[in-house]
Image (tube, rainbow, N blue to C red):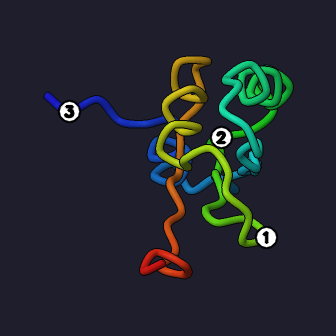
């Protein structure tokens, strides 16, 4: 049996969903994402991680989503195609 995400439960119930955004850090330090996730926990239904933010090399949005998930948040992965061919 598939477990539903918090966001899925909120939307199915017809409630207004609140999401937050975490911009991945320019480095690879997971504590930056953990700190942001802890601030959002309990205040949002899910979080979005931007990809290719300001066209600067940053932590992978996948990695940041995994860290946020480890902190108990539901991730929404955003992927862009910009600069993927360079």
User: Circle 3 is placed at which residue position?
Assistant: 2
In which image quadrant can residue 26 be found? Answer: top right
In which image quadrant can residue 32 be found? Answer: top right
User: Circle 2 is placed at which residue position?
Assistant: 45
Measuring from the top left, give residue 33's x and y in whole percent. Answer: 72, 30
Q: Secondary structure at mark 2?
A: loop
For the N terminus, the image quarter is top left
In the picture shown, does residue 52 fall above or below 73? below
Residue that sits furthest to the front in the current view? 86
Q: Crowdedness of circle 1 by 10 Å Cα count: few (<14), some, many (20+)?
A: few
Asked if the residues shown at circle 3 and circle 2 are in contact, with their CB atoms under 8 angstroms apart, the answer is no
Relative horizontal placement of residue 13, taking residue 49 as reference (left or right): left
Q: Secondary structure at mark 1?
A: helix
Asked if the residues shown at circle 1 and circle 2 are in contact, with their CB atoms under 8 angstroms apart, the answer is no
In terms of sequence position, does the residue under pointer 1 or pointer 2 come before the other?
A: 2
User: Circle 1 is placed at which residue position?
Assistant: 54
Measuring from the top left, give residue 70's x and y in whole percent. Answer: 53, 18
Measuring from the top left, give residue 23's x and y in whole percent. Answer: 76, 50
């Amino acid at each position: 049996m598939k477990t539903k995400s918090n966001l899925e439960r909120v939307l199915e119930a017809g409630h207004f969903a609140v999401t937050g955004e975490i911009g991945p850090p320019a480095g690879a330090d997971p504590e930056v994402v953990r700190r942001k996730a802890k601030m959002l926990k309990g205040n949002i239904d899910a979080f979005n991680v931007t990809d290719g933010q300001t066209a600067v090399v940053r932590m992978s949005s996948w990695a940041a989503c995994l860290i946020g998930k480890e902190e108990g948040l539901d991730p929404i992965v955003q992927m862009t195609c910009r600069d993927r061919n360079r």
